[in-house]
Every structure is written in C-alpha cells, then in structure tokens.
Amino acid sequence: MRYQLKELLDAPLLNTEGLSRDLGSILVIAPHPDDESLACGGLIALLKAQKQEVYILYMTNGEASHPNSETYPPAKL
C-alpha cells in the first residue's frame, strides 16, 4: 500500500510521555543479539527513560555468530 504525504502528516502522533503508562512492562523477543536494538531501540530507550521494566529474550544458541572460526566453532558456542 502506498501512502500519500497528507495521510502520513495526518497520522496520530505517538504519545511518548504516556508510553510507560500505556504499555507497562514489555518483553522484546529477538532472534539473535542486536536485533532488539535495530528493531526496538527507540522504544526500549523511551521506556527505560520512564523507569519502566524492559525484558529482552534472545532466541538463539549463537552457533552462527563466528562462521569459519577456529577459536569459536559452533560446538564451542
């Protein structure tokens, strides 16, 4: 779907001041480390600034993080 500029400008603004009240504690599920920052970094920062609890769950065993490494082969990771 393509949006027109007027539609984007008329979109409601995110209530950043009430974000912690509106969302409460959140759980961010990421397939591997750094995805939470790339996808939800702004949200995490806003909630932490409002003293809200943020939990991050990584769903990986890390075995693909160092391809072809002799120091950190998949079995060691």
Image (cartoon, rainbow, N blue to C red):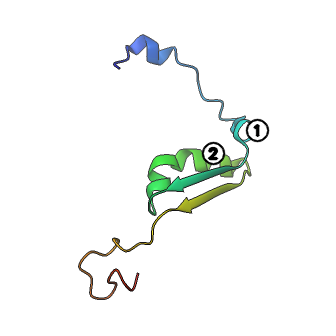
Residue on which the image places disc 2: 46
List the single residue furthest toward the top.
6
- Quick one: SS at disc 2? helix
Q: Residue placed at 63% from the left, 52% from the top?
A: 27
Which label lies toward us, 1 or 2?
1
Q: Decide which of 32, 48 is in the foreground and name it.
A: 32
Looking at numbered disc 2 in the image, what kind of residue is underneath it? Leu
Q: In the image, what residue occupies the spot 37% across and 13% down?
A: 4
Q: Which disc is residue 33 wearing?
A: none
| Residue 54 placement, left or right of 32 | right
Q: Is residue 66 left or right of residue 32?
A: left
Picture quadrant of residue 34: bottom left
Q: Identify residue type, mark 1.
A: Arg
Q: Are marks 1 and 2 in contact (CB under 8 Å)?
A: no
User: Which of disc 2 and disc 1 is earlier in sequence?
Assistant: 1
Q: Specify the farthest residue to the bottom.
A: 71
Q: Is 21 situated left or right of 65 in this image?
A: right
Residue 38, horizontal then vertical, whole percent:
44, 51
Could you say which disc has been placed on residue 21 in the image? Answer: 1
47 and 24: which is toward the camera? 24
Image location of residue 11, percent across then percent down: 53, 18
Near-viewer residue (70 or 16): 70
Mark 1: which secondary structure? helix
Residue 60 in the image: state x and y as whole percent.
45, 66
Residue in the image at 70% along x and 35% along y:
17
Image height of 33 relative to 25, above or below: below
Nearer to us in this view, 71 or 5 = 71
Q: Find residue 51 and report its horizontal and vertical position in percent.
A: 74, 52
Instruction: Specify the quadrant that holds the C terminus.
Output: bottom left
Query: Relative to 1, does residue 60 appear above or below in the rendering?
Result: below
